[in-house]
Image (tube, rainbow, N blue to C red):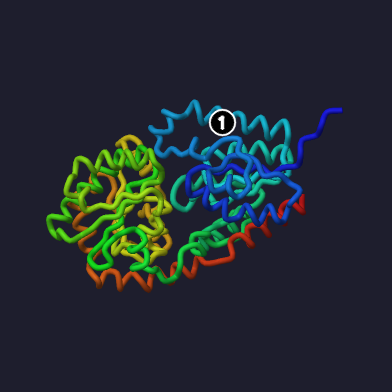
Amino acid sequence: MEKLPAPNIIWSAGENSGDFLASEVLPSVMQEFPEIEMDGIGGDRMIQSGLTPWFHAKDLSVRGYIEVIKHLPRILKIRSQMLKRVSKMPPNAFIGVDAPDFNLAIEERAKSKGVPVIHMVAPAVWAWRPNRIHQIKRAVDHLLLIFPFEKEIFDKADIPSTYIGHPLARLIPLEPKTEEARRELGLPVQGPVVAVLPGSRKDEIKWCGPQFFGACDVILKSDPSVKFIVPAADEARKAEISKILDTFPKVKEATVLTLGNSHKAMESSDAILVASGTATLEAALYKKPLVVGYAMPALSAMLILSKGQTKWISLPNILAQKTLVPECVQMFCNPDILASHILHALEPSRAEMLRDVFTEMHHSLLRDTPKLASEAIANVLHKS
């Protein structure tokens, strides 16, 4: 007799941020369903938390239309294999984490097979592609929301959802320990420190890196005492960043380039220069003045910006629904403009003004995310 496959829940998480979010929830789900295997797509954190990986999350980590085209054959092959697995051996549940362009088609197939579908991190229909809400309704049984304002949007669309808070709000302390972080990273306790985060992807570093480090060069001309801390996501990104730094010798001399430690780097700083993405929220949760810069190929930018539904690209501004921090995109992401904003961010009055706002934001995102998420997932499975 053919052996039946073990019961399983399939997870599908792309990007570093999705891997982190899912890794915070995965242990609670495993505790709730100890007899069910956890399989699918995830990164190092999910694997360490108990996921059996079919593919690694980094295989889906691509941003921008033109960049996706270059990697499309690989991505489509992975999605095809996921669709086959869902069809031939339907799991007990399918949990997609972010990555809606990849996950929603698989979720539609899974739901059509009677598989309960949960999606963590709602597609940002409030920011762009609002019509996608119809596909979400077809594909998903329950949404796990990480921003409080999203509940009303999906309630109006009659899509079941639970606000679970943002896991980063639990991970990042309400009161940053700046001096302690500096000592750990080998930075001087006194004097201005700027954390520079040009992105975790190769294309981001290629496009943002020269502009960011060019800005550091301008800053040093204004204040030679400034030090820079630059966390690299992995060895490959570290090598790419180091190569760019070679073209800015004075900046390289004033820079500590570290592997990982992005949170410590932010905590150690007086101001942060950061590419758009989850890192903008991390910077705000560390109560630091930040400047957002982003550059990409012109065609990608034109296509993305043309579909935008909000005037902001950074999470602190979107959550506040006003311009709290500067956003320098495309032609405005240049050394002189970035440097001007960072020098302003280093003024003590700027930090003081933002601290209370960011503290209030932190409290609004602070929930027992693993408990709320695992309870919502359990409720969906028990109803099926």
Residue at 24% over, 45% down = 211
Q: Quadrant of residue 187?
A: bottom left
Depth check, front residue: 10 or 179: 179
Where is residue 73 drawn, in percent x and y? Answer: 49, 26
Residue at 41% over, 59% down = 282
- 165 with respect to 229 (left or right): right
Where is residue 217 drawn, in percent x and y? Answer: 17, 50
Q: Residue furthest left?
A: 221
Q: Quadrant of residue 83?
A: top right
| Local SS, label 1 | helix
Q: Is residue 72 above or below residue 349?
A: above
Q: Tally the numbered discs.
A: 1
**Amino acid type, mark 1:** Ile
Depth check, front residue: 40 or 354: 40
- 254 with respect to 182 (left or right): left
Q: Badge 1: how crowded within 10 Å, few (<14), some, or many (20+)?
A: some
Residue at 39% over, 33% down = 67
Locate the N terminus by quadrant: top right
Which residue carries the number 1 mark?
Answer: 78
